[in-house]
Amino acid sequence: MTYQKRSKEQLAIRVAQDIGEGNIVNLGIGMPTLVANHIPADLEVVLHSENGILGMGPAPAPGLEDYDLINAGKQPVSLLKGGSYFHHADSFAMMRGGHLDICVLGAFQVSATGDLANWHTGAPGAIPAVGGAMDLAIGARQTWVMMDLLTKQGQSKVVAECTYPLTGIGCVKRIYSEFATLACTPQGLVLIDLVDGLTLSELEALIGLPISPALTV
């Protein structure tokens, strides 16, 4: 049976489905910023950006961009009613003070037990510093990773042990990818869902690690 991988937009929709009412959420640079466009209008979610925004909305319509109002990835964003922007030192105090419910980050690698590696000075085009990722990964109540499961060379980014510099140890609770959603636990990977047509054994072959079939995490 054939399967269809999730597109980036479908992946953003999948992440948005797990964000609950009243959550305060930081969306990291890159793919995670797409999640802002798929949060239901009737769901009260407060989006935070580490450069100093609270109450961030979806991407503005073409022609309505204000480049004085950008997220941490320098993309223009909108501001919802009641939203505000402020000094990034205050923003980091929110991150470090445990005031975020969820952060959604990209990654180069995630270990089966939740170690996170999402910066690397030697990678082409990589941000040459960890930025606020350490503060987010440890400060948020839950750290989720949203990423392509495989590198361009077909190697799994979910690994037994990270070989890139670590951002945080045991901090990742969930991995959202184009193939599946996984939970990271001290005992290893646990399956949350698969795309239609993909089997657990096929996913294990892609990753090269055992995955518990439990579906309630």
Image (cartoon, helix red, strand yellow):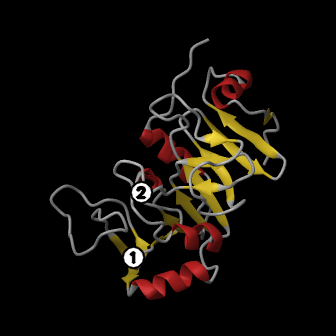
The residue nearer to you, when weighing 168 against 201, is 168
Viewer-side label of 1, 2: 1
Q: In this view, does 162 lie above or below 71?
A: above
Tell me what residue is drawn at x 56 percent, y 51 percent.
164
Q: Which amino acid does label 2 sit on?
A: Thr
The quadrant in which residue 50 appears is: bottom left
Q: In this view, does 39 lie above or below 69?
A: above
Under circle 1, the secondary element is loop
In the picture, the disc for residue 51 is 1
The quadrant in which residue 55 appears is: bottom left
Under circle 2, the secondary element is helix
User: Is 74 on the left or on the right of 206, as rendered?
Assistant: left
The residue nearer to you, when weighing 202 against 158, is 158
Residue density around tag 1, few if under 14, some if 14–19, many if 20 or more, within 10 Å: many
Residue density around tag 2, few if under 14, some if 14–19, many if 20 or more, within 10 Å: many
User: Is 133 on the left or on the right of 217, as rendered?
Assistant: left
Q: Where is residue 17 in the image (x, y as percent from the top left)?
A: 58, 50
Q: Which amino acid does label 1 sit on?
A: Asn
- Which comes before the other along the chain, label 1 or label 2? 2
Tell me what residue is drawn at x 22 percent, y 75 percent.
68
Q: Is residue 135 above or below residue 35?
A: below
Q: Position of residue 97 (x, y in %)?
A: 62, 84
In the picture, the disc for residue 124 is none
Q: Where is residue 166 in the image (x, y as percent from the top left)?
A: 60, 59
Tell me what residue is drawn at x 19 percent, y 55 percent.
62
Q: Position of residue 160 (x, y in %)?
A: 72, 42
The quadrant in which residue 21 appears is: bottom right
Tell me what residue is drawn at x 31 percent, y 65 percent.
77
